[in-house]
Amino acid sequence: MKKITTIGLDLAENVFHVVGFDARDKEVKKKMLKRSQMLKYFVQLPPCLIGMEACASAHYWARELERQGHTVRLIPPSTSSRTYAATRTTTMTPAPSPRL
């Protein structure tokens, strides 16, 4: 398996969507996680860059993931919704990886 260097994380109430990319921005992993599985999954990964839309719970998850050695970037909702509108993607069909 190729090494995951960047992750796009879509937060929701109970199910989170994780999309992992390698150093060449090629999608290498796609996974759905329940809230109880989140930290267990990310503790197994080597430190990487994680991008997620800024929302109320994003700040909590950012702190938890940074404690595990990951770098987290919060994307303003206005930016992520423009990406969605421009590409007409759904949650499990990610837009092209923006440089974070």
Image (cartoon, rainbow, N blue to C red):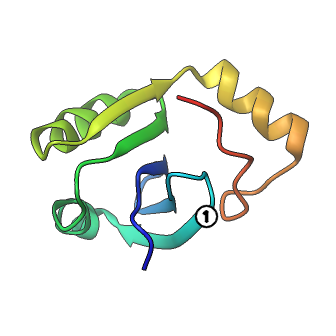
Horizontal arrangement in the rendering, residue 38 relative to residue 24 (left or right): left
- x then y, percent, for residue 25: 61, 51
Q: Is residue 12 above or below residue 73?
A: below
The answer, for residue 10, to whether it is visible in the render is: no
Which of 83/11 is in front?
Answer: 83
Q: So how many labels did they put on this image?
A: 1
How packed mark 1 is, by other alpha carbons closer than 10 Å (few <14, some 14-19, many 20 or more), is some
Residue at image point 59% right, 53% down: 24
Kindly identify the residue that appears in the image at 46 percent across and 38 percent down: 51
Along the line of sight, the residue nearer the viewer: 94 or 17: 94
Q: Amino acid at mark 1?
A: Glu
Residue at (33, 33) in percent of width and height = 72
Q: Secondary structure at mark 1?
A: strand
Q: Is residue 1 visible?
A: yes
Q: Which residue is mark 1?
A: 27
Find residue 67 and report its horizontal and vertical position in percent.
10, 39
Q: Nearer the viewer, residue 28 or 88?
A: 28
Q: Quadrant of the N terminus?
A: bottom left
Left or right: residue 91 versus residue 48 is right
Is residue 76 shown above or below 26? above
Q: Residue furthest left?
A: 67
Horizontal relation, residue 82 to residue 74: left or right: right
Residue 52 x %, y %: 47, 38
Residue at the front extreme?
A: 24
Q: Position of residue 84 (x, y in %)?
A: 78, 40
Please, is residue 89 above or below residue 45 in the view?
Answer: above
Q: Is residue 26 left or right of residue 40?
A: right
Residue at 30% over, 62% down: 35
